[in-house]
Image (tube, rainbow, N blue to C red):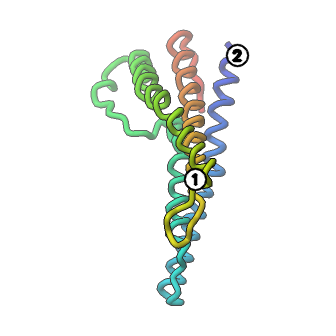
Amino acid sequence: MKAMISFTRFLDQFNRRLGDWFVSWIMLLIMGVVLFEVVTRRFIGSPQIWTQEVITYLFCAHFVLALGYTLHYKEHVVADVLTVLLPQKTQVILESLVYFFFVGLFLYVMTPTAYKFSERAWRFGERAATSFNSPVYLVKVLIPISLVLLTIQLVALLLKNGLFIFSNTKIEE
C-alpha cells in the first residue's frame, strides 16, 4: 500500500514540477517575444519575420505540454451538475470511469498517430512553408511527449481514485 502511495505521489510530482517550472516559463517566453514584436513593429517600425511563427510554436508547446499538468489539478472542463449530488465514493467511481474511457480512448487512438506524425516530420526534417522556413519537426515531437505526460497523469489519477475507492485512503496533493 505504501509503495503504491509513493509511486502515485512520484507520478503526480513529475507533471506538477514540469508544469510549474517548464510550462510556466514557456508562457513568460511567449510574453517576451510578443513584447519584442510590439516594440519592433510599433516603435521602431521594423517588424521581424520570425516572431509570429515563434509565438505560434511556443504557444503550441505550452498547450500540449500542459495537458498532464492540467489533469493533475483537474482543470479540464467537467460537467458535474448532477454528480455533485451523489455520495463521494460514487463520484470518484464515475470520475474514474469517465477518465479511463474518454481520456484512455483518446490516448489509445492519438499516441500511435502522433508518434507516426512526429516521426515522419523528424525523418524528413520538415520545415514551415514560410519565408522564415523554421523547423516544424521540433514542435511536432512535443505532441507524443505530451501524450506520454498525459498518460502518466491518468495513471496517477486512476491509482489515487482506486486507493480511495478500495481503502478510503485519500492522497493529498
Q: Amino acid at mark 1?
A: Val
Q: Which residue is mark 2?
A: 2
Secondary structure of the residue carrying numbered label 2 = helix
Extreme residue toward the top, this view: 166
Position above or below: 147 against 128 = above
Q: Secondary structure at mark 1?
A: helix
Farthest residue to the left: give it: 82
Pinpoint residue 24: horizontal percent, then vertical percent: 59, 54
Image point (55%, 37%), residue name: 147
Q: In which quadrant of the rendered image does the N terminus lie?
A: top right
Reply above or below: 44 against 80: below
* Number of residue marks: 2
Of residue 69 and residue 81, the one placed in the foreground of this image is 69
Identified by mark 2, the residue type is: Lys
Q: Which mark is residue 26?
A: none
Left or right: 15, with 44 as reference point = right
Which residue is labeled 1 in the image?
139
Residue at the image point whose x is 49% and y is 27% from the top: 108
In the image, 9 versus 170, the foreground residue is 9
The numbered mark, 1 or 2, whose residue comes first in the sequence reads 2
Residue at screen point 50% across, 13% down: 165
